[in-house]
Image (cartoon, coloured by chain):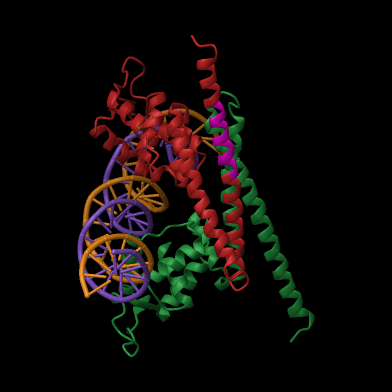
Chain colours: A green, B red, C orange, D purple
Amino acid sequence: MLEFAVLGILHDSAMHGYELRKRLRELLGSLRAFSFGSLYPTLRRLQRRGLIAERDPEEGARSQQRRARKVYELTAEGKERFAELAEDAGPSSCDDEGFGVHMVFFARTSASARMRILEGRRRRVEQRREGLRSALARAGEQIDRYTRELHKQGLETSEREVRWLNELIAHERAEQETEESEESGHGR
Amino acid sequence: MLEFAVLGILHDSAMHGYELRKRLRELLGSLRAFSFGSLYPTLRRLQRRGLIAERDPEEGARSQQRRARKVYELTAEGKERFAELAEDAGPSSCDDEGFGVHMVFFARTSASARMRILEGRRRRVEQRREGLRSALARAGEQIDRYTRELHKQGLETSEREVRWLNELIAHERAEQETEESEESGHGR
DNA sequence: GCGGTTATATATCGGGACGATACATCGGCT
DNA sequence: AGCCGATGTATCGTCCCGATATATAACCGC
């Protein structure tokens, strides 16, 4: 997950670790923390695999600013790997974090993969919704008051997210049709 | 976190691993998966620390049913540890999973700890809300359409949760006052 | 200009949790 | 008879977090 997120952010512009994490928090809105304890090992792992590379510290400018920063940039292999991960609608793209990270990079994801990911996420949230529904129906009165309150809140949140996903999916479909009609409409 | 959850469930009744996980999913509504890969190591760790104990497999009944099940029960130390964890309103009680687990056991948590935990959670969600607000305000138009949509959904969810927490907190306060007036009201 | 705090920046370590996998045993289905 | 799915316990590699350590530059009062 972190690998995908790092690749996606470096795809825009080269960056050093500290900056990368700020961008991560900004994009994911603390949906996911991604502490340094995982970020730096990930950067080294990616570098070792040749997906990112350390850029020269441009000594021309005023060197020796703060502590030596390591600016990373995406390699060609890194770009390939990012594209591969962006298209993958596997189970990791369905949980809260995974879905969020994928969606942030939707602009660089194919329309078909966007669709698969949105629908996968919807299925997941629907499952959670049904689980909560049956938990609330089952033994309506006997279970703990606080637990029931928690379940009710979770159910409402799930229902809202499903509606939101439905809107997004409908929008995707509409846009796809527009493009298709444009293609065939005034041909070329 | 798993430690706390296991202790809390075994507090009600002795149980074996497989059953425990079902109960876990039921209570937390797939808020948290808690796979066997973490559950069984946790059980052994707890046993090693003397917080839970393996109960005799009651050979009187038909023995040798399925594979030998290990039924665990809480020890006196385990009950102490649970009470300690339930009262702890530290940072782990603020994130999504931690808060959920705590709330499920609110019936066995002191009113003051319930208050601290609810307020801690509210502070956390408010922070997330403000982060998303500023992300949406900052560069209102230039950022990615999908990212913005994700942030809007996150913001709405946060706002709803804060409102929900406010209601819970108000309810807690009202109940506390009722108890106090009953105490002094018709003395005893 | 001296020391204190804060922000910037990289790094390591232990531990908790996950997903995949393996294994064993039973009931039911075909 | 043979297979599958539910029940049940267990391990392994990997990911990630939180705490912690270590530098260094900027800001600020004194």
State whether residue B140 is above or below residue A152: below
Q: Work out whether residue B32 can be spotted.
A: no
Question: Residue shown at 36%/18% (left/top)?
Answer: B62
Is A118 within the magenta? no
Question: Is B30 located above or below residue C8 in the figure?
Answer: above
Instruction: State left or right for residue B16 relative to residue B56.
Output: right
**Which quarter of the rendering shows the N terminus of chain A?**
bottom left
Q: Position of residue B18 (x, y in %)?
A: 40, 34
Could you say which quadrant of the image residue A74 lies in? bottom left
Q: In this view, does B63 lie above or below B85?
A: above
- Closest to the observer: A96 or B157? B157
Q: In which quarter of the image is residue B181?
A: top right
Any part of residue A178 in sight: yes
Residue projecting furthest to the right: A185
- Give the number of marks: 0
Question: What span is in magenta?
Answer: B163-175
Q: Which of C5 and D17 is in front in this view?
A: C5
| Chief SS of the magenta region | helix
In front of the other: D17 or A136: D17
- In front of the other: A115 or B166: B166
Q: In which quarter of the image is the C terminus of chain A?
A: bottom right
Give the residue drawn at x 54%, y 17%: B182
Vertical order, A14 against B28 (above or below): below
x and y percentages locating residue B101 in the rendered image? 45, 38
Is B87 displayed left or right of B175 in the figure?
A: left
Residue at the limit of the structure toward the bottom, as seen here? A60
Q: Which residue sits at x=59%, y=55%?
A: B155
* Location of residue B109 in the rendering, given as x and y in whole percent from the top left corner: 43, 29
Residue at the image position 57 percent from the left and 68 percent from the top: B138
